[in-house]
Amino acid sequence: MIAFLPFFLAPGYLAGYGLNLFHFRDAGWTERMLLSVTLSTAISPIAATLIGRYLSLRVACVFFAAITVAALVVAIRDARRQRGGRFSREMKIGGAIFAGWMVIAIASLVDLQFGTRLYMPMAAFDQCLRAALAAAALRTGVPPANPFFYPGHFVPMRYYYYWNVLCALPARMFGLTPRVSALAGVVWSGFALAALIPLYLKHFCEETVALGRKSLLGIALLAVTGLDLIPTIVYFLAQRTILADMEWWDGVQVTSWLDSLLWVPHHVAGLVACFIGFLVLWVVPRNSSQRERMQAAVIAGLAFASAAGLSVYVTFTFAIFLVIWTLVLLRSHLYPEVLMFAVTGIVTIVVSLGYLHDLRQPGYGGTFATFYVRALETVENFGDNHIPWQWLEDIFLALMLPVHYVVELGFFALVGFAQVRKYWRRQGPLLKWEWAAICICGVSLLVGSFLMSTTGNNDLGYRSILLAQFILLLWAVPTVYRWRAKGRRGSWRLACQVFLWVGVAGVLYQLIELRAFTILLDRSSYVDEAPWLPHSDDIGSDVYRARAGFEMLNRKLPQDAVIQVNPTNPAYDVNIYYARQQSVAGLRNCGTPFGGDPFACEPIQRKILEAFNGRNAYRTEDANQLCTDLGIDVLIAERSDRMWAIKRSWVWSGETLVENPYMRAVACGKRRAEVAAGFRR
């Protein structure tokens, strides 16, 4: 986590101070730190990828080191000029919250080891991809090569790689493993999200009374989710099964903040980049000079460019809002602001030209998005079974959307209904920020309710709702703050409090569930299936053996070595979580959603599968020929592979590098003698 200071603190501090964004030079140290983290989240990803693409990752590390030194010099000089002050009660509580988040993140993400049994965190289901992609960025630069596809040459990734490049830089600068670096990035993503809340309360929502307390309330509300705990309990009572993640009871989840941070921190970072970029434009006064407007436009353009490479789904949704808001400004004849937004768009496109080129590369998947109506699974099943016409079913599902959001958003759904009612009944006009908040929330809900992505998971539906979740959280802050005031407690307030505490209980359950699931899988029958983990009665021992084997390979194999496991083995998490090398076909379909031609993958994968799951013995000479043809240096068999059971196969007769009851790594191909000699040294 300390290794991320040059990337998540220093750039934002220097930019804020140099351009005096948000009156940075006059702000207190607390606000400066909040601005530094959020501005760094907006600037660092695009800076790292641009420098890495056109120069090298080494130059990028030097750049960020220089930025850190400069920021430190400026901070020390300012600290001498300013008088020291006492820490307020709110600052102490805020510090405790941030420290608590560090402890929670570490406890949720590290491996737990008991003797010779090892238990991965449940979030490794997604974090294994981040670890592999960060390792690819270290090996191949920007854009990183797809670590799961090597048809004789590197295949560049086409999207989602800004976060992985950013996580690769601390690993390169300080000699960390990419896996640990990627996990540490989760902590800073949480810091950035929490820091965004006080900034929006002050500069967007125009909160001036008790801002410190309201900021703490807003950050605390990140620990509230919907009513997911109730259907989770019902599911357990009906099926006697504990799900791997509480969110999985619903196929179109509205993800809790905790879950989003632990599983997909790059989407949260993309959200922060979008919102801080918009806030930079928002706070520019009408009487500002053209120079000040252009400076804000450049910073906002960099922020939106970062967001596009961090989360294309969040940025797509926010871009729709930006277009609508620009039209609103145009209709209001605010031409200087329209020009500022236009320049922002130009800057975003110019600095994203390389990334836009990458997006056009071939890869597995259909259209970006298609129409559908979001619905709870039980409601959708009812419509499929009882409504004969699709158009009528869509209308039915649309009418049931409020039920879906009440369950998934819980307390925040009640806050949203109350806010709409408040605005509807108001006699005077709404404030500018209120219109903007309504627009963001509306666009987010429309996209999330009626569009879905077609790349396997409905990531567009999951992540576009993050925008609405953030606005609802801002609206909830004054609601909860007013509960402190004396007065009659009505049924609405009671319902809000019940929903809030159910949401808190849901997050606490989710926190325990995500950490304990793999342990329960090894010790209990009351858990759902987990095909992505080894299949045995002693999963903890298998994971321990797998990590030990891959760590030895990581230490002794050449950096450019190519390894190959069974690409269709469903227990892929362990392999890509602990390995750091390139694979020819590391996943089913060679991971071509990240980049690469799926039609080129199919014949290669078919050849490889014959070596692992063929009906007849695949001998050492056959394995060597396969490795020579495909450029493989090490074949890795696992106990579940069919060839493991055939004693005459390459698994048992080749040049063994690593062997234990779970896995055997065998040198093969042109470099087998060189690789084997490296292991013996």
Image: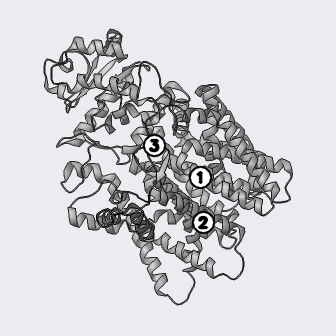
Q: Give me the C-alpha separation between circle 3 and circle 1.
A: 18 Å
The spot of residue 354 in percent (x, y) is 62, 32
Which element type, helix, strand or loop, lies under badge 1? helix
Sequence-wise, the earlier of marks 2 and 3 is 3
Q: Give me the C-alpha separation between circle 1 and circle 2.
A: 16 Å
Sequence-wise, the earlier of marks 3 and 1 is 3
**What's under tag 3, amino acid-wise?**
Leu
Question: Callout 3: few (<14), some (14-19), or many (20+) C-alpha neighbours within 10 Å?
Answer: many
Q: Quadrant of residue 73?
A: top right
Query: Which is more foreground, mark 1 or mark 2?
Result: 1
**What's under tag 1, amino acid-wise?**
Val
* 544 relative position to 178: left or right: left
Residue ID at (50%, 87%): 489
Q: Give me the C-alpha separation between circle 2 and circle 3.
A: 27 Å
Observer-nearest residue: 439 or 666? Answer: 439
The spot of residue 245 in percent (x, y) is 34, 55
The spot of residue 650 in percent (x, y) is 21, 17
**Residue position for label 1:** 272
Residue ID at (65%, 46%): 303
Which element type, helix, strand or loop, lies under badge 3? helix
Residue ID at (45%, 82%): 494
* 658 relative position to 130: left or right: left
Observer-nearest residue: 575 or 646? Answer: 646
Question: Callout 1: few (<14), some (14-19), or many (20+) C-alpha neighbours within 10 Å?
Answer: many
Tell me, for residue 183, which label it has, or none: 3
Tell me, for residue 329, which label it has, or none: none
**Residue position for label 2:** 215
Residues at discs 1 and 2 in contact (Cβ within 8 Å): no
**What's under tag 2, amino acid-wise?**
Ser
Q: Quadrant of residue 578?
A: top left
Residues at discs 2 and 3 in contact (Cβ within 8 Å): no
